[in-house]
Amino acid sequence: MTDSVAAVRPFATLAALAGALLITVASPPIATAVPAPTPVTDHCPNRVGTPPPVDESEVVAPGVTMPTPLPVPNPAVGGERLAGCGVLADPALGPVPPRLTSAGWLVADLHTGQIIAAKDPHGRYRPASTIKVLLALVALDELDLDAVVAPSPEDWSQEGDSCGMGPGGHYTTRDLLTGLLVVSGNDCAHALARELGGVDTALAAMNAKAHALHADDTRAASPSGLDAPGMSSSPYDLAVIFREAMRNSTFRELIAMPTYRFPGYPKRPDVPGDKDHPAYLMQTSNHLLLEGYPGMVGGKTGYTDDARKTYVGVVERDGRSIMTVEMFGLTVGSNSYWDQTKSLFDYGFRAPRDVSVGTLVDPGARATPPGAPTTPTAAPSYTRAVVATGTDQPTRRAVHLLIGLALAFTAVVLLLIGSRLWRRR
C-alpha cells in the first residue's frame, strides 16, 4: 500500500502544480503589474486633478496646506470639443496609432495651431521636465544671455539630472539655458530660478506666463519639473507653451542642439585628491534628435515616478511643422515610447491641412468669456470623434484563459494515468 501511494504521489504532485499554474495563469492580470496600452480616460478621471502619486514627493510639510486643484474653465479652452476626455480624431483619417501608452496626447500643426487629434487634451497630468520650457520662456524674457552666473551649493545639489555645475565654475545664462534644454539639468533650472529672484519668484513668473498663454491647466510647483504639491499641466497646455517658445529664435536654436560643450570647474581644495573638472560634450535627452529622425527640429523630454514619461516636440517636413505631446506614458516591453512618438508624428503628417478638432489659442485671444463658470461639466458629445480604448487587455486575458484550459486538461490526464497505475499495482 505504501508503494502504491508512492507511485501515485508524483502524479498527484504534478496535478497540484498544474492546478496552481491554472489559478496563476488563468486569473486576470493585476492592473498595476503591466500598464495596458491606451489607458481609458473616457470617464474623465483627470478632469480636475492629476493621477494619484506613487511616492511621497507631494507630501506637504507640517502646517502647510495642500494646494487646491485649479478651476476647470467652461467652455474648454481651444474649443468645445476639447472638453471630451477620450480620443478626438476625424474618422476619415483612419484609426489613430495603436498601442499608445500615454494617458493624454495631442497632435497639432505648429503654424496654424489646428489640433489634428488628441486624447484627454485637458486632462491634468504632471509635466515633469517639460515644464522647463515654461522656465526657459520666462528666462528668455527677463535675463541677459551673456550675464555670468556663479553657482551655489543649492544649485549643484539638486536631485535628478544635472548639467554638472560645480564650485568655482562660471556659466553664462546661455550656458544654463542650453543645459536646461539639452540634458534637462535640474542644477541649471535652480540657478536660473535664483537669477530670476529666487524659486518662489520664478514660480510666480512661470505661472503668470502660463496664465497669459491661456494654459489654465498648468501650475508650476518646481522650476525643474520635479514633483511637488500642486504640480499640474495638460497635453493642450504643453502644446500652447511649446508653440510660444518656438516663436523665440534663441529657443529654437537651443532646442535643436544634439550636443553642447558645457563649461567645467576647477578642482575643489577641500576634497583630497580632487582634479580639475574640464568642460565636456553633453548630449541631448531627445532621442529622436540624436538618431536623426527625419525633420526633427527639437523637443523636450521629462520623467518622474509620478509623471511617468512626458514629451513635447516638433518635426518639419515639406513645409509643414507637426507638434506632438505625450503625458503619463511608458515603454512597455517591445512597445518603445519613442516608436509611439514617431507614430504620432507620422499620423499628423498624413492628415489633410484642414482637419481640426480644436485650436491652440494665441496669447491675444480671449480663451474664456468674461464671467464664464469654471466648474467641471459633462463632456459634450462629438459625433465625428473616434474613441480608442485599446484591445490589448481583453486579448491578453483570452490568451491566459486558453493556457489555463490547456493546463487543466493536462492535470486531468495526469490524474487518470496515476489512477490507472495505482490499480495495476
Image: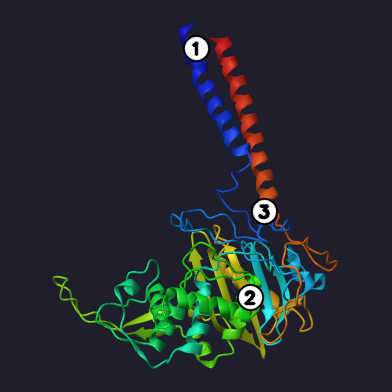
Percent position of residue 171, x then y: 33, 86
Mark 1–mark 2 CB contact (< 8 Å): no
335 vs 200, left or right, is right
Residue 204, image x and y in percent?
51, 76
Q: Percent from the top left, x then y, of residue 115?
A: 72, 77
Q: Secondary structure at mark 1?
A: helix
Q: Which residue is mark 1?
A: 5
Residue at position x 53%, y 26% from top?
14
Mark 3–mark 2 distance (CA, rounded to whole Å): 33 Å
Viewer-proximal residue, 230 or 38? 230
| Callout 3 secondary element | helix
Select label 3 or label 2 by which is in front: 2
Q: Which residue is mark 3?
A: 392
Instruction: Report the Cα–Cα distance between label 1 and label 3.
Output: 46 Å
The relative height of residue 5 versus residue 212 in the rendered view (above or below) is above
Answer above or below: position of 40 versus 181.
Answer: above
